[in-house]
Image (cartoon, rainbow, N blue to C red):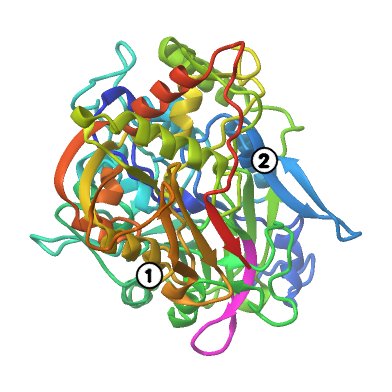
C-alpha cells in the first residue's frame, strides 16, 4: 500500500526501503512423489527406463513482508478464512519464525523448488527491522533461501544508494556497522527492477531478470515495481530514476529471454488488485476466470505476452489466486499472498523437458496460512533475539497509555480512530505560532502502518505504548510541514481523495478535530465530497481565505495523488511525525487516565 516514505534521516528510525520482496516465491519444485517414475501422466510408464517428459517445479512466493519479523500485532496479524458454513474466521498468522517453518515444510519432497517475492520486503518496517535500516530482514530472507525478489515502491524509501547497499552489502554510511566485528553482507538473492532506469544513462538500476537453473530446468524471472512508484515515494527516494510501463517492460525482457532459449518465464510484479472477498480462500474465478478481482493488475495481466507463464503480484496487501486471460485468451495464474508474511503461495509449474516451457493447463496454485501453532524456526528465533537485544534500550521506552485498542491499519472505515489521534497530535504540536500556527492537519491513510494494541507485546504491561509500538505505527519519520493553502485549494484536496488517480481506490485523508464534512459515496468522482458541508470549527471554508495546514512532507510534496497539497507556500518545517505522536501520547495519557479510542464523527459517510 502506498505509505509515507521515510527519509534517510533520523538514523535510528530510518526504515530500509523495502519495495520488492512481495513475492519471495520459493519456486520450490514440487515434484509429487514418484513423478520421475510415473512420467507425470504423460505416457512414460513406470519401469520402462524412459526419462519423464515433464517435471513439476514448485514455486513458493510471498509479498509485502515490510520487515515484519515478529508476528504482527492486533487485527493486522489476522487472515480471514471462509468456513464451509459461510461464516468468516480470523486466524492469527505471520512472523518469520513461522514463515520459515512453513516454507521449509512445503519444500520437502520437491526436488525442484524456487522461492520468489513480489516486492516491499523492507520499508515501513517495525522498529526491530527499521531501526537497523532493514538489515535484520535481509538477513532473515537469506536464511529463508529466497531465490529472487522484485523491488517494490518501499525499496526506494531511502533512495537508490541505500537499495544498492541492501543488495550488495556494506555498513550504513551514517550509522556504520551495528554489530562489532560484523559487516552487513547484503542480499544473497537478486533484487530485480526491470522497469527502473537511471535518468542520466538510461541503463537499468538493477538486474532486469534472472534465470533459475537446476538439472537442465531453466525458469526466467522478470521483476518490476509499479510505474506509479514516484507518486507514492518521497522525491528524494526516486531522485535520478525513471519508472517505465510494467507491460511494455515485461514484454521486452520476455522476448529477450525467449531469444536466449529461456521459454519458461514468471513475472514478479509489485502491483496488484482487489478480490471481491478478503478471505484468502475465496475463489476469484467464480463464476468465470478472474471475475472476482478488480484493480490495476487485471489490465496489466491482460497485456503481458503469453510467453510469460505466471504472475506473482503484490502491493495491495490482498490475498488471491486467480486466472486472468492472456492476450491470446488463454488462462494464466495471477497470485498474491496478503502481507506481513501471513500467507505464502504454493504454485506447481509443470515443466516440459523437451519444449523447455511450462504446460500452462497444468499450473495449479493455492495460498496457505502461515499459522502460529506450528514449531518456530530456531534460527529465526535467535536472529530476532539478537536484534531485539540491540533495539531494547530504545524500543521498550514507555510513551503513553491506552485503555483499549485504537485501530489504524486494522480499520476499514474511511475515518480511523488512530488516524484521528495522529492528526490531532500533528495539529496540537504545530498550532503554536512559533511552530507554524497550524489550524488543521491532514494525515495520509497509507502512512498508518499498524494499530495501537492494548495487549502487551512484551514485558511492558497491558495498555502501555512503547517507543517500538509507536514507531511501528509511524515508521517513516517524515518531517512535518506547515504551509499556506487557500480555502479553494483545501476543498480541491478533499475532492482529490475520491477523484483523478484516487477515484477507483479512494484515499481518505485523516483529519484533525474541528474539520467536518460529508462524503457521499452514492455519487461519483469529486462530487462525492459535499462541498457546502465542509466546515472548520463550525464555520464554512472560505475559498479566498488562507489557512495554515499541517501535514507530513510526503503529502506536502503532492504525494498519494494530492497535487493541491503540493501547492502550499510559506513553508515551515517542524518536528517529525513520530516525535509529535509520542509527545501527544505523553501529554494526554497516564497510567491512571489512559487515552481512550476517540469518536469517529468528523467525516459523515453516506452509502
User: Considering only vertical position in the picture, is 550 above or below 428?
Assistant: below
The answer to whether residue 291 of the structure is visible from this angle is yes
Query: Main SS of the magenta segment?
Result: strand
How dense is the environment of label 2, judged by Cα within 10 Å: few (below 14), some, or many (20 and up)? many
Whether 442 is drawn above or below 162: the answer is below
Answer with the quarter of the image where residue 514 lies.
top left
Depth-wise, is mark 1 or mark 2 nearer the camera?
1
Residue 85: where, in percent of width, then height? 91, 59
**Residue at left offset 44%, top offset 26%:** 127
Residue 324 within the segment the image draws in magenta: yes
Q: Secondary structure at mark 1?
A: helix
Tell me, yes or no, if residue 145 can be seen here. Answer: no
Q: Position of residue 450 (x, y in %)?
A: 53, 38
Tell me if 479 is positioned left or right of 111 in this view: left
Q: Residue furthest left?
A: 200
- N-terminal of the two: label 1 or label 2? 2
For the record, the magenta segment spans: 320-332
Instruction: Please name whichever residue, 140 or 447, is drawn nearer the observer in this view of the structure.
Output: 447
- Nearer-the-camera pick, 124 or 34: 124
Give left or right: position of 150 versus 469: left
Q: Position of residue 100 (x, y in %)?
A: 60, 36
Q: Residue 186 appears in which quarter of the rendering?
A: top left
Q: Which residue is mark 1?
A: 501
Give me the disc on residue 401: none
Q: Is residue 452 above or below residue 465?
A: below
State the mark number for residue 102: 2
Compared across the picture, whether 306 is left or right of 549 comes to right
| Residue at 47% over, 22% down | 585
Q: Residue at x 52, y 22 (%)?
A: 384
As helix, strand or loop, the secondary structure at mark 2 comes to helix
Q: Is residue 60 magenta?
A: no
Place of residue 466 in the rendered image (x, y in percent of width and height, measured from the top left): 50, 18
Amino acid at each position: 500500500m502506498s505509505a509515507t516514505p521515510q527519509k534517510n534521516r533520523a538514523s535510528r528510525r530510518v526504515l530500509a526501503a523495502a519495495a520488492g520482496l512481495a513475492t519471495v516465491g520459493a519456486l520450490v519444485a514440487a515434484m509429487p512423489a514418484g513423478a520421475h517414475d510415473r512420467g507425470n501422466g504423460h505416457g512414460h510408464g513406470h519401469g520402462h527406463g524412459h526419462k519423464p517428459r515433464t517435471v513439476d517445479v514448485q514455486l513458493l512466493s510471498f509479498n509485502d513482508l515490510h520487515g515484519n519479523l515478529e508476528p504482527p500485532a492486533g487485527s493486522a496479524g489476522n487472515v480471514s478464512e471462509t468456513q464451509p458454513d459461510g461464516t468468516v474466521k480470523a486466524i492469527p498468522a505471520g512472523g518469520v519464525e513461522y514463515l520459515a517453518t512453513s516454507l521449509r515444510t512445503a519444500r520437502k519432497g520437491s526436488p525442484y523448488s524456487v522461492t520468489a517475492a513480489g516486492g516491499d520486503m523492507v520499508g515501513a518496517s517495525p522498529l526491530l527491522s527499521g531501526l537497523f535500516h532493514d538489515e535484520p530482514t535481509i538477513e532473515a530472507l537469506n536464511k529463508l533461501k529466497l531465490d529472487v525478489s522484485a523491488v517494490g515502491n518501499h525499496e526506494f524509501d531511502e533512495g537508490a544508494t541505500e537499495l544498492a547497499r541492501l543488495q550488495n552489502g556494506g555498513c550504513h554510511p551514517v550509522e556504520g556497522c551495528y554489530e562489532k566485528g560484523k559487516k552487513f553482507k547484503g542480499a544473497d538473492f537478486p533484487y530485480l527492477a526491470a522497469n527502473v532506469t537511471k535518468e542520466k544513462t538510461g541503463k537499468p538500476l538493477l538486474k532486469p531478470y534472472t534465470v533459475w537453473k537446476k538439472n537442465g530446468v531453466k525458469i526466467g524471472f522478470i521483476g518490476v515495481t509499479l510505474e506509479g512508484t514516484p507518486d507514492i515515494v518521497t522525491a528524494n527516494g526516486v531522485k535520478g530514476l525513471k519508472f517505465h510501463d510494467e507491460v511494455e517492460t515485461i514484454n521486452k525482457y520476455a522476448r529477450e529471454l525467449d531469444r536466449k532459449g529461456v521459454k519458461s518465464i514468471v513475472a514478479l510484479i509489485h502491483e496488484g488488485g482487489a478480490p471481491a472477498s478478503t478471505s484468502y480462500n475465496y475463489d476469484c474465478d467464480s463464476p468465470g476466470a478472474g471475475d472476482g478481482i478488480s484493480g490495476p493488475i487485471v489490465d496489466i495481466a491482460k497485456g503481458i505476452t503469453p510467453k510469460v507463464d505466471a504472475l506473482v503480484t503484490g502491493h495491495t496487501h490482498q490475498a488471491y489466486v486467480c486466472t486472468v486471460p492472456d492476450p491470446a485468451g488463454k488462462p494464466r495464474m495471477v497470485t498474491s499472498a496478503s502481507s506481513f508474511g501471513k500467507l505464502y503461495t504454493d504454485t506447481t509449474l509443470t515443466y516440459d523437458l523437451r519444449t523447455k516451457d511450462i504446460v500452462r493447463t497444468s499450473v495449479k496454485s493455492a495460498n496457505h496460512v502461515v499459522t502460529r501453532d506450528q514449531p518456530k524456526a530456531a534460527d529465526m528465533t535467535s536472529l530476532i533475539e539478537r536484534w531485539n537485544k540491540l533495539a531494547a534500550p530504545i524500543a521498550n521506552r514507555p510513551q503513553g497509555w491506552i485503555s483499549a485498542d485504537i485501530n489504524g491499519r486494522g480499520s476499514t472505515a474511511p475515518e480511523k480512530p488512530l488516524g484521528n489521534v495522529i492528526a490531532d497530535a500533528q495539529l496540537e504540536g504545530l498550532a503554536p505560532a512559533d511552530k507554524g500556527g497550524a489550524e488543521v492537519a491532514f494525515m495520509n491513510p497509507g502512512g498508518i502502518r499498524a494499530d495501537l494494541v492494548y495487549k502487551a507485546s512484551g514485558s511492558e504491561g497491558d495498555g502501555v505504548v512503547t517507543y517500538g509500538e509507536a514507531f511501528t505505527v509511524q515508521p517513516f519519520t517524515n518531517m512535518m510541514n506547515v504551509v499556506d493553502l487557500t480555502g479553494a485549494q483545501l476543498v480541491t484536496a478533499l475532492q482529490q481523495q475520491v477523484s483523478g488517480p484516487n477515484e477507483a481506490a479512494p484515499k481518505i485523508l485523516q483529519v484533525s478535530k474541528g474539520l467536518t464534512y460529508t462524503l457521499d459515496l452514492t455519487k461519483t468522482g469529486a462530487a462525492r465530497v459535499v462541498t457546502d458541508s465542509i466546515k472548520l470549527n463550525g464555520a464554512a471554508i472560505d475559498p479566498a481565505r488562507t489557512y495554515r495546514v499541517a501535514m507530513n512532507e510526503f503529502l506536502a510534496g503532492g504525494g498519494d495523488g494530492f497535487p493541491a497539497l503540493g501547492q502550499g507556500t510559506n513553508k515551515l518545517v517542524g518536528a517529525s511525525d513520530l516525535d509529535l505522536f509520542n509527545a501527544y501520547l505523553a501529554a494526554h495519557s497516564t497510567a491512571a487516565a489512559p487515552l481512550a479510542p476517540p469518536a469517529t464523527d468528523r467525516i459523515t459517510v453516506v452509502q
